[in-house]
Image (cartoon, rainbow, N blue to C red):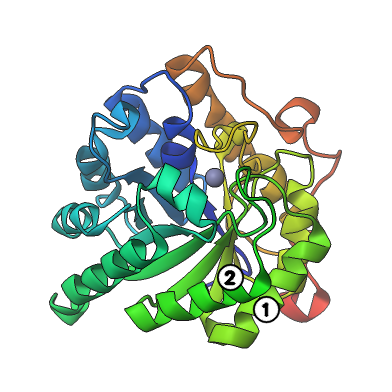
Amino acid sequence: MDGIDILISEVGPRDGLQSIDAIMPLEAKKAWISAEAAAGVREIEVGSFVPAKLLPQLADTREVVAHALTIPGLTVAVLVPNARGAEAALEAGAHKLTLPLSVSETHSLRNLRRTHEQVLEEARAIAAMIAAQPPEKRPHFEGSLSTAFGCTLEGAIPDAQIARLAERLMAAGCDEVGLSDTTGYADPAAVKHLINLVRDTVGEKTLTGIHLHNTRGLGLANALAAIECGLTTLDSSLGGLGGCPFAPGASGNIVTEDLVFMLEAMGLRTGIDIDRLVATREILAAAVPNEPLYGFIPDAGLPLGFNAAARRPVKEVA
Ligand code: ZN
């Protein structure tokens, strides 16, 4: 990756906003995305192409995508629950499409109202739609293995089932699979175990990212475990906004501000200016004033004399 070690994928405008009742005005969404991009965030999941009656919070995703596409260098990602959503995402011109597949079939039925076979059928249809585009217009297509670390309805999901679904998503035409701790059940050992399992199944290059929550306080520990395994893309949400409305008790993605601090303190480049990132919270505080914002760095501030550049390993500075 150009000039950075770890790609932070901000998911607040999708994952965060879909989990709260308040509807953020379109202008605030645009300002939020612009401000984070200006702070150095290079990828933002800006919305989800779901019917407006299911998620009125994201009903303006098309307009949000159009705005985000005007920001140079920003990868504009969206969630698509099915082929119909992907069609809208293609029309809108999104750079990256993520189709979630709950490895728990019970959760899949509850969340997407589809069996595994039906979701895989959607994946094949989406891949065919993408293939029909001119090469320069083809978005990146990720299949996300959600509830990978356990489900609130089924509990632990067998390794063999996760591996088989990873394999089938790739066979259906995904460019990549991702792991998602939808329920906040993960721990660092489980993160390492699942990354190795999926990589052994589909290959190292087709698993680069992970979506973690901080539901039980292990978000950053899990992120560190993922980095130690060599993953390079981490999802997080400004102010920890969000969670999963279909997984009772699961609330809050990892806080982008704290994640960036940990990485930069370790000498890993994110390309993000922490002070400018923290300032972006003001947009959330003004637009959804009743929502709690989480994070330690915004309250505690950076350590005295903190200089991320000075922390880079010598070999990279030279
Ligand atoms: Zn999430």
The residue drawn where x is 38% and y is 40% is: 34
Number of numbered discs present?
2
- For label 1, being within 8 Å of ligand 1 is answered no
Amino acid type assigned to the residue bearing label 2 in the image: Ile
Closer to us: 67 or 304: 67
* 219 vs 173: above or below: above
Query: CB atoms at circles 2 and 1 under 8 Å apart?
Result: yes
When the figure is inspected, residue 233 is found, relative to residue 50, above or below; the finding is below
In the foreground, 187 or 60 = 187
Where is residue 31 shown, x and y percent of the image?
A: 37, 32
Which quadrant of the figure contains the C terminus? bottom right
Q: Residue at x 21, y 70 (%)?
A: 125
User: What label sits on residue 162 in the rendered view?
Assistant: 2
Residue at left 77%, top 39%? 216
Q: CA distance from mark 2 to mark 1?
A: 9 Å
Res 197 label: 1
Q: Is residue 239 visible?
A: yes
Few, some or many C-alpha atoms within 10 Å of disc 2 (few <14, some 14-19, many ≥20)? many
Q: For the residue labelled by badge 2, is the local secondary structure a helix, a strand or a loop?
A: helix
Q: Where is residue 311? Give x, y as percent.
A: 81, 62
Compare marks 2 and 1 and give the one earlier in the sequence.
Answer: 2
Q: Amino acid at mark 1?
A: Leu
* Residue 35 visible in the picture: no
Report the residue that reaches farthest toward the right.
Answer: 304
Q: Nearer the viewer, residue 281 or 251?
A: 251
Depth-wise, is mark 2 or mark 1 nearer the camera? 2
**Ligand 1 occupies quarter:** top right
